[in-house]
Image (tube, rainbow, N blue to C red):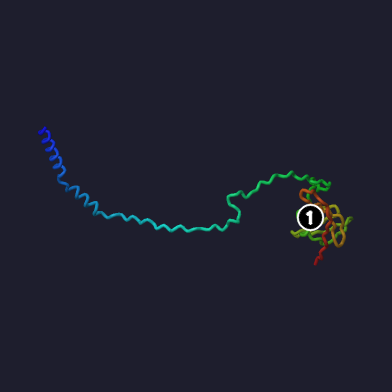
Amino acid sequence: MLDRLKMSMVLIVFSLAGCQQNKDDLQTYVAEVKAQQKSDIPPIPVMKPYEKFDYAAAEIRDPFLPTVVDVPETADEPILDNGISPDSNRRKEALETFELAQLQYVGTLEQEKKWALVRSPDGVIHRVQVGNYMGLNHGKILSISDNELKLNEIVSQGKNGFIERETSVSAVEVK
C-alpha cells in the first residue's frame, strides 16, 4: 500500500509540474488583447421621468364607439300621382337647354301668325310661337303679347310628383 501511496504522490507532483510549463505565449496574447483600442459603447440614454397626463376630453364623444347609428329603414313613401307630368316622348326644343333667366324676349314678328323673338345666351335669336317650349322646366308658351311671354311650367316636387305653375318672361328694350 505504501507503494501505491508513493506512486500517487509522484503522479500528483508530475502533474503539478506539467502545469508550470512556459506560458509566455499565453501572456503575450493577453497583453495584445488588452493593448487593443476598445470600441466606444454609447452610454445608456437617460430616461425622462414619467409625466402624469390629465385627460380633459371626458365630455367629448368616445372615439371607440361607432359614429354611425343604425336606423331602421322606413318604407318608401308612395309617389303621389296627380296626373301632371312632362311628356317624356316629346323632342326637346333648342330653348329648353337654357334657364328662363338666361333668355331675353326682344320683340315680336307677325307673318300670318304672331311670333316672339327670343335671344339665347349664345347671341342667337330664336323665333317661337304659342305651343313652343322654352326653359329647363318644360315651359310651354301660352300667349305672346308685346310686353311678355306667358308660360306654363311643369316643375318637379321630388317624391310628391309634379306641379304646374305659370310664369312669364318680360320684354327687354333693344337698343
Q: Quadrant of the C terminus?
A: bottom right
Residue bearing the label numbered 1? 135
Residue located at (82% from left, 56% from top): 127
Q: In the displayed structure, would residue 78 be above or below residue 105? A: above
Closer to us: 74 or 77:
74
User: Which residue reaches farthest front?
Assistant: 1
Q: Amino acid at mark 1?
A: Gly
3 displayed left or right of 61: left
Foreground residue among 125 and 66 = 66
In the rendered image, which quarter contains the N terminus? Answer: top left
**Could you tell me residue 137's position as x and y percent?**
79, 53
Indicate the position of residue 40 as horizontal and vertical percent values.
Answer: 32, 56
- Splitting the image into 4 quarters, where does residue 134 fall? bottom right
Classify 146 as above or below 91: below
Q: How many residues crowd around disc 1 within 10 Å: few (fewer than 14), some, or many (20 or more)?
A: many
Horizontally, residue 4 falls left or right of residue 46, namely: left
